[in-house]
Image (cartoon, rainbow, N blue to C red):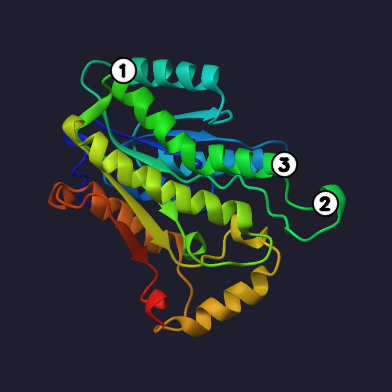
Amino acid sequence: MVKEFEQHDYWALILGGSSGLGLAAALKLAAHGMHICIVHRDVGADMDQVSESFEQIRATGVQVITFNASITNVEKRAHIVTELQQQMGSGGRVRCLLHSVAKGALKAMDQPGSASLQTDDFMITLESMAVSLYDWTKALVRQALFAADARVLSFTSEGSSKAWKNYAAVSAAKAALEAVSRSIALEFAPYGLRSNCLQAGVTDTRSLRMIPGSEQLLAYSKNRSPFHRLTTPEDVANMVYLLCKDEAAWVNGAVIPVDGGTHIN
């Protein structure tokens, strides 16, 4: 395995990297020599599996630092950025900021009383799954922690333009995330940032299983796929890796399907 990122002392800052797509991306980038900083939010029994996953990343030989904290907490963000800066030293820079956050309200609009989707649910979901991408990008820019040719990547889905019961808040957040990513692509271009969304196909992850009707969604997506299979976290991680290579420097402001062609059917 060629570790092409190792010689540059590159880092990836992954928001939501303890499972699913974020973890798969961390493992892929680490295998190619990129140091990893993960911000995640896990508690209790989940921590055993999370710790085991982090050890898998360390086994690749790269530096790994992790923070179990809310990505929307202003004080925590400032602390993490400072700690990352110290860990990187004078030579290290962030090559990739990856947004893989799955913290959203999954409620129907038509339920009685407080069981229905509330305005606060929308706002919390939007902050976590969309606005936070801008907050972290700005924080790294202000501290001059990005590499000269850096990537800002985020995970969206077909849900940004389609409706699924109980998915309204997340759908709105995904649409907003794509808009934020496009604006970063334009307004932070002077800093050398390339910003793109990866529209991942339906993937059988813990986050997906939390969506009401997920079994139906999985079956439907598999039938739509030209290859008659679901997207895997590794499929998406491969695209993250490709976009971090020098050859992807002219890809900016895009929403890139990573679903084996499911979106065309």
Of the residues tagged 3 and 2, which is closer to the observer? 2
**Residue 65 falls in image quadrant:** top left
Relative horizontal placement of residue 64, taking residue 222 as reference (left or right):
left
Kindly identify the residue that appears in the image at 32 percent across and 61 percent down: 256
- Label 1 amino acid? Gln
Residue matched to label 3: 45
Using a 10 Å C-alpha cutoff, classify the residue at mark 3 as few (fewer than 14 neighbours), some (14 to 19) or many (20 or more).
few
Q: Secondary structure at mark 3?
A: loop
The relative height of residue 63 versus residue 78 in the rendered view (above or below) is below
| Of pointers 3 and 2, the one earlier in the residue sequence | 3
Using a 10 Å C-alpha cutoff, classify the residue at mark 1 as few (fewer than 14 neighbours), some (14 to 19) or many (20 or more).
few
Residue matched to label 2: 115
Q: Nearer the viewer, residue 192 or 6?
A: 192
Residue 139 in percent (x, y) is at 38, 23
Residue 146 in percent (x, y) is at 26, 28
Residue matched to label 1: 143
| Of pointers 1 and 3, the one earlier in the residue sequence | 3
